[in-house]
Image (cartoon, grey):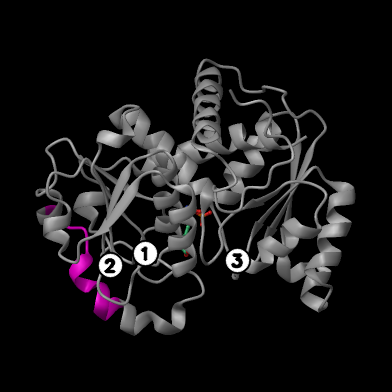
Amino acid sequence: MVTSLKGRHCLTLTEFSREELLFILETSFSLKQRYLAGERIIPLLPGRHLAMIFEKPSTRTRVSFETAMRELGGDAIYLSASELQLARGESIEDTARTLSRYVDGIMARVYEHWKLEKLAQYSRVPVINGLSDLHHPCQALADVLTIIEKKGRDIESLKIVFVGDGGDNVLHSLMLAIGILGGKITISSPPGYDPHPSVLKLFNEHASGSFEIERDPYKAVENADVVYTDVWVSMGQERERERRIRDLEPYRVTVNLMNRAKKDAIFMHCLPAKRGEEVVDEVIDGKWSVVWDQAENRKHAQKALLALIIP
Ligand code: CP
Ligand code: NVA
């Protein structure tokens, strides 16, 4: 039985056991149902404030966190890292110490993952990863919520395939989430684009599930229930653009590729998509695509996370 998650950070999802992750997901479902039934405000966090630090642009993360906090009876403060004293050299330690005297939680989107670890180390309040170069745990919560909604709770029986950059932050979090829940994920990426060693270490330590790497995307998606992709050039990797496009070209999600998956397979993407690169219009706008439901679920999953970890 899960007692309390209050005060917990969420940097990689490995802060949570399988049982705790399932509890967050069940809470997400219940908050979503209540919201859809017309209960727009569910005041589980009255008077609480979330500081949101962004070093990179965002549409979904910013708006889903901001609306989530307001709908929980609290509020959120958008902070561009370039406008904080951080930009003039104030340390992360001092920023964490200061912010946690004002707010009840800190969400941050950063270039380097170590910055989140430092924030968490010096913060008195929970720190949530809103995307780093290595992890995107809130995206993975919404992804698993979507997979369960579309394919049922028996995650272990599903064939989930990620096609593209095996070193992608969104994939890292998805593989950890699926792995902690006991499922299996197939990664189809070219040599040199494998998951980061630190993520493999976390996977070995925390996951009861498994993963496999299949270089051939057509073999990989055979009989897939879920086909997932993300951009080939993530924020911060712009200088590698040419090489990445060249290497990842064979991993574009096309109609031909989707036709190899199960008839009722779903297509997922965290968004924003670079249409024509990692996925073609006919797939992202086609019968397989669940990307808008997936984006919507960001808010419901984060509401549960916030309600459970913010004291
Ligand atoms: N998926 C995601 O995190 O989107 P944003 O970059 O728009 O926040
Ligand atoms: N992998 C992408 C995800 C964006 C939500 C990036 O880091 O840019």
Give the amino acid type for the residue marked by disc 3 in the picture. His
Say if the magenta span includes residue 247.
Answer: yes
Q: Are marks 2 and 1 in contact (CB under 8 Å)?
A: yes
Span colored in magenta: 245-255
Residue positioned 32% across, 83% down in the render: 243
Magenta portion: prevailing SS class: helix
Q: Quadrant of the C terminus?
A: top right
To which residue does mark 2 refer?
Answer: 277
Residue 60, position as x, y percentages in the image: 52, 49
Residue 109, disc: none
Separation (CA) of disc 2 from disc 1:
8 Å
- Tell us which disc is closer to us: 2 or 3: 3
Give the camera-side residue of 85 and 223. 223
| Quadrant assignment, res 165 | bottom left
Q: Is residue 266 above or below residue 278?
A: above
Residue 231, disc: 1
Dot 2 crowding, Cα within 10 Å, few <14, some 14–19, many 20+ = some
Q: Are marks 1 and 3 in contact (CB under 8 Å)?
A: no
